[in-house]
Image (cartoon, rainbow, N blue to C red):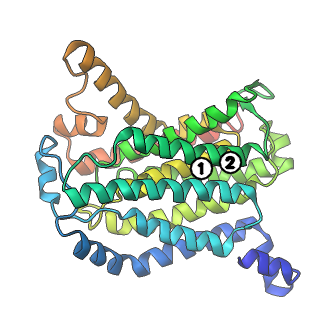
Amino acid sequence: MLYLLAEWLGFEGILNLVRYQSFRAGATLMTALVIGLVIGERFINFLRVRQGKGQPIRLDGPQSHLAKRGTPTMGGLLILTALTVAMLLWMDLSSPFVWACMAVTIGFGVIGFLDDYDKVSKNSHAGVPARVRLAGEFLVAGIASWLIVSQINTNLYLPFLTGVSIPLGPAYYVFAAFVIVGAGNAVNLTDGLDGLATMPVIIAAGTFAIIAYLVGRADFSEYLGIPHVPGAGELAIFCAAIMGAGLAFLWFNAPPAAVFMGDTGSLALGGALGAIAVASHHEVVLGIVGGLFVLEAVSVIVQVFWFKRTGKRVFKMAPIHHHFEQLGWSESKVVIRFWIVAIVLALIGLSTLKLR
């Protein structure tokens, strides 16, 4: 909104700053952070009053989690509010990439909200049936993929290799939708401990802010040997909004959490990362940067598959962060060590920009 206004006024005087994506990224981050911090406490009190018992706690989980009874969920609404306002203020709203990623973020947020609402209202862990939820996610992801692919080609670019790509043709639409849905659900599975999903999402968003900015610049893309996507630099501002809103939420989600993100936030943030990765043609790199989320998802898949075949468990409990809790690690130890893993994976992901 401010960008379009500044453009209409010819970027005169101080408005010339709005022309630069780096300035708008910093402004977006700070705007989302301030909004989240200002409304956070009142928002959480509102959720606490409306929800009463808060998020249902699994009785078969770690016993230490029973102390979290009564903690409100749907904190993702706080993230979405701060993120959306900041984006509408600072981003170039004429960009199809912006609307595609925003559609995924809000669409997945709505699906997550309905799931959270069903759990809280019925005091149950069941929520919306998985098939219904996945159908909604693929519908949203499919629309976003169509918008994104209208601006880019359908090649799958491989990291560490210059100029090497796999032409997927029409299959790329399906692939892109799977990346978006997979990312959303992987982050959702990771969100099981206070602060566990929030910081890795912030780290991944910061990493993709750099990637999106470089991909959007023809000079840097040519120098690094990475695919150039005109207009993708605007997604660096989107990533900054995620970082700002995520930091504000982490202020209240730090152990012991005053609020849980819920599916409202985890699905939205994961889906947003997936959409950004598709738009910047770094889908494979998302698997590296978001390797922690991949590990969490794979641990659940392996656990379910192996238990159905043999009746035995590979892990003491899945997702894998609960496995380490059952081994005797404290919650804070699991969270901080997983943060370290996320940082290392982000650095490996960034190295793909140069190691070619």
The kind of residue tagged 2 is Ile
Numbered-mark total: 2
Q: Secondary structure at mark 2?
A: helix
Q: Residue at 32% of width from left, 63% of height from top?
A: 253
Q: Residues within 10 Å of mark 1 (few under 14, many from 20)?
A: many
Q: Which residue is mark 2?
A: 211
Q: Is residue 150 left or right of residue 269?
A: right
Q: Which mark is residue 207?
A: 1
Label 1 SS: helix
Using the image, determine if residue 61 lies above or below residue 159: below
Residue 48's x, y, as percent?
Answer: 24, 72
Residue 225 location (% of width, % of height): 80, 36
**Residue that extends furthest to the bottom in the rendered view of this protein:** 13
> To which quarter of the image does residue 177 belong?
top right
Mark 2 closeness class: few <14, some 14–19, many ≥20 residues within 10 Å: many
Residue at the spot 53% in from the left edge and 61% down from the top edge: 243
- 44 in relation to 268, above or below: below
Residue 161 image point, x, y percent: 73, 26
Q: The disc labelled 1 sits on which kind of residue?
A: Thr
Q: CA distance from mark 1 to mark 2?
A: 6 Å
Q: Quadrant of residue 356?
A: top right
Q: Residue 54, relative to residue 313: is it above or below? A: below
